[in-house]
Amino acid sequence: MDAATRQLIFEDARKWVYQAGKQIRDQIDDPYQIDTKSDANDLVTAVDRSTEQFFTEKIREKYPTHSIVGEEGYGDKVESLDGTLWIIDPIDGTMNFVHQKRNFAISIGIFHEGVGEIGLIYNVMEDVLYSGKKGEGAYRNQDKLPPLGEQVNLETSIIALNSSLACENKRINEKKVQQLIKDSRGTRSYGSAALEFAFVAEGIVDAYLTMRLAPWDFAAGLILVEEVGGVTIQANGKPVNLLEKNTILTCNSKIKQQLLDEYIEFK
Ligand code: 2AM
Ligand code: CA
Ligand code: CA
Ligand code: CA
């Protein structure tokens, strides 16, 4: 994608993100329907749905040849990374949206022929937009984010992870995760994968480890993290797949190998 095209799409995407965010803020205290999806704690609301529909309508009108993947199913059936693809999570952190009325984000990643071109993560209630364009750096509102630090080590790192990783489970060795909790400076759980990615890009968290994220949870985040020199991989060390669920490790490159070698072990 050439820089001029990227800029035009970026400006539209950013405009729509701000509009959608304002709509959400304006109705934050209104009643809305809450349903569950895969289990009783997997929530979805009418606001998730209407926000995704807002984006799909805007994109289809302006960019009819582009494809869309959205969590709530208003996008297309996408089976390849051909062409220009928008990957959308209308509300990332729905549980926070419902219970806290804050700490949730709109997340949009835009890819061209499988290459990450534009990432937008909007913390709606704080009105903070993290944005990035391929090769042009990442921003927090108007401020350019500096490259991630070179002098990072695990002992002084803050690691974002879901506490369930430290509980007995079938997938990964929880003892190693418990050791990671002890060896790192501290851990955090924000409840929005997109914001956790944004915090890695901002350098206020040094890594984020999580199981089973869908493409809309990490599409924007991986572009932002890459723009500040960080890495995003599957927790088994393989490259991420944009069309499937993935385990995810996104972090400062300096601690990647140590995390993979010493703290992440699949059963
Ligand atoms: P969501 O709010 O868009 O569903 C919560 O730890 C984070 O994990 C959120 O970013 C949430 O995204 C995501 N997530 C992915 N799969 C989930 C699931 N089955 N149930 C709840 N949260 C899920
Ligand atoms: Ca969801
Ligand atoms: Ca999500
Ligand atoms: Ca969501």
Image (tube, rainbow, N blue to C red):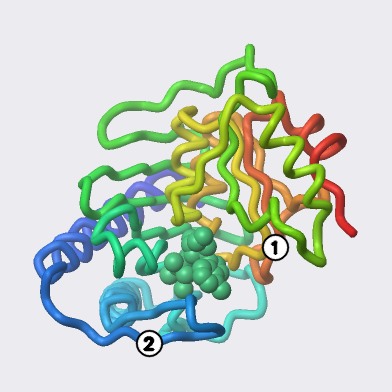
Q: Secondary structure beneath disc 2?
A: strand
Q: Which residue is mark 1?
A: 246
Dot 1 crowding, Cα within 10 Å, few <14, some 14–19, many 20+: many
Q: Residue at x 63, y 59 (%)?
A: 114
The answer to whether the residues at label 1 and label 2 have Cβ atoms under 8 Å apart is no
Relative to residue 58, is residue 76 depicted above or below? below
In the image, 114 versus 230, the foreground residue is 230
Q: Is residue 49 something one can see in this rendering?
A: yes
Relative to residue 195, is residue 71 depicted above or below? below
Quarter of the rendering containing residue 219: bottom right
* Residue 202 position within the rendered picture, expressed as x and y whole percent measured from the top left: 44, 31
* Quarter occupied by the C terminus: bottom right
Q: Is residue 88 something one can see in this rendering?
A: no
Dot 2 crowding, Cα within 10 Å, few <14, some 14–19, many 20+: few
The CA span between labels 1 and 2 is 25 Å
Q: Look at the numbered disc 1 and say if its residue's Cβ is closer than 8 Å to ligand 1.
A: no
Q: Secondary structure beneath disc 1?
A: strand
Quarter of the rendering containing residue 231: top right
Q: Look at the numbered disc 2 and say if its residue's Cβ is closer than 8 Å to ligand 2.
A: no
| Amino acid tagged 1 | Asn
In the image, 132 versus 47, the foreground residue is 47
Q: Residue at x 51, y 49 (%)?
A: 221
Q: Residue at x 87, y 36 (%)?
A: 261
Q: Which mark is residue 258?
A: none
Relative to residue 2, is residue 207 depicted above or below? above
Relative to residue 160, is residue 234 depicted above or below? below
| Amino acid tagged 2 | Asp
Q: Which residue is mark 2?
A: 35
* Residue 255 position within the rendered picture, expressed as x and y whole percent measured from the top left: 72, 27
